[in-house]
Amino acid sequence: MNPGELNSRISILQETKVPDDQGGYIVNYELRVILWAKITTLTAKTIDQYEQLTPELLHRIVIRYRRDVTVTDRIQYGDRLFEQIGPPINEGERNTYLRLECQEVVADAASD
């Protein structure tokens, strides 16, 4: 892969759990690192789910290899948010690039 293809500035957000007053916890996301990535859209479709049309966008995000990226991390690109749908993949097991398969978190169309 040509390193020049890493042309999108993204933020990796780490999941943190904060205890609430009822014995449970609240999930928050805190900035872990800002880095360069290549974002490729794989599929875009609309799903009829619970009598509501829901857009589903799947993306592949490639970054330089890092050991600290986990499946619970989220990726932010501008005002867009991505959740990983599988564990990070070490491309070719060579510790050079990490592939993240993600689903874009789309705001509920009914809330507009």
Image (cartoon, rainbow, N blue to C red):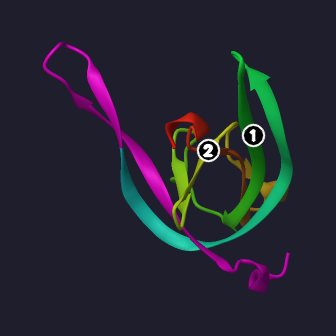
Residue 65 vs residue 86, the one in the foreground: 86
Please say whether residue 17 is one of the residues in the magenta stretch.
yes
Q: In the figure, residue 28 lies in which quadrant?
A: top left
Where residue 10 appears, as percent x and y from the top left, is: 56, 68
Which mark is on residue 67? none
Label 1 and label 2: CA atoms lie apart by: 8 Å
The quarter in which the N terminus is drawn is bottom right
Q: Are marks 1 and 2 in contact (CB under 8 Å)?
A: yes
Which element carries disc 1, helix, strand or loop? Answer: strand
Sequence-wise first label, 1 or 2: 1
Amino acid type at circle 1 is: Glu
Q: How many marks?
A: 2
Which element carries disc 2, helix, strand or loop? Answer: loop
Amino acid type at circle 2 is: Val
Q: Does residue 54 sit above or below 6 in this rendering? A: above
Left or right: 75 as drawn, with respect to 20: right
Where residue 102 appears, as percent x and y from the top left, is: 70, 46
Where residue 93 appears, as percent x and y from the top left, is: 79, 54
Question: What residue would you read off at disc 1?
Answer: 56
Where residue 3 appears, as percent x and y from the top left, is: 76, 82
Q: Does residue 22 sit above or below 81 in this rendering? A: above
Residue 76 vs residue 18, the one in the foreground: 76
Residue that appears at 81% across and 36% down: 46
Q: Which residues are magenta?
A: 1-28
Residue 112 vs residue 23, the one in the foreground: 112
Which mark is on residue 106? 2
